[in-house]
């Protein structure tokens, strides 16, 4: 019987900054259309330095434009959330996912707004590789990792035991808490070769049982875990 490999989505299968920066660009274009000022260079600079909070307000303040909170919320944030950019998985994912599909049962558990996460998965074109894709909010608006619910849903759906399953993620605050406590395996993938801005890289929390730096290392690590 195949073992089960469950992936996180953002910064695990693709670089989330792809999505963030494309959506910021779309919102900045809207602002430029309305005020004839480009706020994107400031947003890009701050984001690249690991500053992710209140970027619209800070950028607008930086360029000296008077703008209401209603405009930011109803126009810029709305544009950001509704924009659907083209996305590309990590090269390592694309090189190895077909072989992983042949060897293991595969699933995704991801947090976040259902419509946004579903749109990301569609843009990445990866649904065909996975037996189950679960956005945790499908189980309830307040359900998210590290809750046991999404993990247990996937394991039950595929009839898999904890010891024969592994979760691969990037966020120490929530990804590895339940796998570590339930008898699952856990892997923290730090794909810095392909992503120089790991958004959750500074999170404190519970460490995974294993680390790897690339998908090439991940393939070998999975074989050692399940040998």
Image: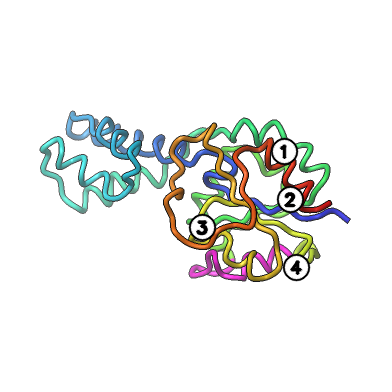
Report the quarter where the N terminus lies: bottom right
Q: Are marks 2 and 1 in contact (CB under 8 Å)?
A: yes
Which residue matches tag 1?
97
Q: Are marks 4 and 2 in contact (CB under 8 Å)?
A: no
Q: Position of residue 36 (x, y in %)?
A: 18, 29
Nearest to the eye among marks 4 and 3: give it. Answer: 3
- Mark 3 and mark 2: span between their CA atoms? 21 Å
Q: Earlier in the sequence, mark 2 or mark 1?
A: 1
Q: Residue at x 84, y 53 (%)?
A: 2
- Mark 4 and mark 1: span between their CA atoms? 23 Å
- Mark 1 and mark 3: span between their CA atoms? 24 Å
Q: Position of residue 88 (x, y in %)?
A: 56, 33
Q: Which residues are magenta?
A: 139-155
Which residue matches tag 3?
172
Q: In front here: 31 or 92?
A: 92
Q: Are marks 4 and 1 in contact (CB under 8 Å)?
A: no
């Amino acid at each position: 019987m195949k073992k089960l490999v469950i992936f996180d989505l953002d910064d695990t299968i693709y670089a989330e900054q792809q999505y963030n920066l494309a959506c910021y660009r779309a919102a900045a274009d809207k602002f430029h259309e309305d005020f004839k000022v480009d706020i994107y260079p400031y947003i890009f600079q701050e984001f690249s330095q690991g500053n992710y909070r209140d970027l619209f307000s800070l950028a607008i303040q930086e360029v000296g434009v008077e703008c209401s909170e209603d405009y930011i919320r109803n126009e810029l944030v709305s544009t950001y959330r509704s924009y659907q950019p083209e996305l590309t998985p990590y090269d390592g994912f694309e090189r190895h996912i077909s072989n992983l599909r042949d060897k293991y049962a595969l699933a995704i558990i991801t947090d976040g707004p259902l419509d946004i996460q579903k749109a990301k998965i569609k843009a990445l074109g990866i649904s065909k590789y996975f037996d189950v894709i679960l956005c945790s909010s499908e189980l309830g608006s307040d359900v998210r990792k590290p809750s046991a619910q999404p993990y247990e849903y996937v394991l039950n759906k595929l009839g898999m035991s904890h010891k024969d399953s592994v979760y691969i993620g990037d966020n120490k605050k929530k990804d590895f808490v339940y796998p570590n406590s339930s008898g699952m395996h856990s892997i923290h993938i730090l794909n810095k070769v392909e992503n120089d801005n790991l958004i959750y890289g500074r999170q404190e929390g519970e460490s995974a049982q294993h680390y790897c730096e690339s998908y090439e290392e991940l393939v070998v690590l999975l074989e050692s875990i399940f040998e």
